[in-house]
């Protein structure tokens, strides 16, 4: 069994991996605009977070020439997206927004 811990208190990732570490985590470069992007929307499944993300996407689509959306609603607030949804996000989305309902 694998356990993945999610800790939102760890702070932001460094822009580059520090020398001498074996970490492969780096912060993605922010695109200059959303035009031409496929937006990933990740909702935690609580409250009206999904509705908020849908409304946000409608606003972004009205102001930028976005190519599409990949929408994921997680099974629980305390877990990452399931393997199928994670695959869809990483294959198709070029930027992502997460939303937390409550």
Image (cartoon, rainbow, N blue to C red):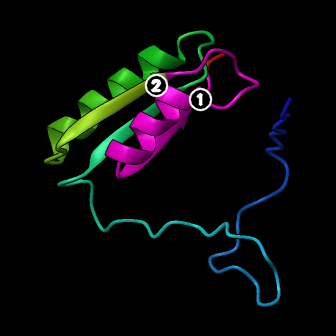
Asked if labels 2 and 1 touch by Cβ distance under 8 angstroms, the answer is: yes
Q: Which of 66 and 76 is in front in this view?
A: 76
Quadrant in which the N terminus is drawn: top right
Question: Which range is magenta?
Answer: 73-100
Q: Mark 1 points at which residue?
A: 81
Disc 1 and disc 2: Cα gap in Å?
A: 7 Å
Residue 84 belongs to the span the image colors magenta: yes
Res 42 visible = no
- Is residue 38 rendered to the left or right of residue 98? left
Percent position of residue 82, x then y: 59, 26
**Residue 79 lies in what quarter of the image?**
top right
Q: Mark 2 points at which residue?
A: 72
Percent position of residue 55, x then y: 34, 23
**Residue 7 lies in what quarter of the image?**
top right
Please say if 63 is above or below 33. above
User: Residue at 68% of width from left, 69% of height from top?
Assistant: 24
Numbered disc 2: secondary structure: strand
Q: Nearer the viewer, residue 102 or 41?
A: 41
User: Residue at 70% of width from left, 73% of height from top?
Assistant: 14
Percent position of residue 21, x then y: 82, 81
Res 26 visible = yes
């Amino acid at each position: 069994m694998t356990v993945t811990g999610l800790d939102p208190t760890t702070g932001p990732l460094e822009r580059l991996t520090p020398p001498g570490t074996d970490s492969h985590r780096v912060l993605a470069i922010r695109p200059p605009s959303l035009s031409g992007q496929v937006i990933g929307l990740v909702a935690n499944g609580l409250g009206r977070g999904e509705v908020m993300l849908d409304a946000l996407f409608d606003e972004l689509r009205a102001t930028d020439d976005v190519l599409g959306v990949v929408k994921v609603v997680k099974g629980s607030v305390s877990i990452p997206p399931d393997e199928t949804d994670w695959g869809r996000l990483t294959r198709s989305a070029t930027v992502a927004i997460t939303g937390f309902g409550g």
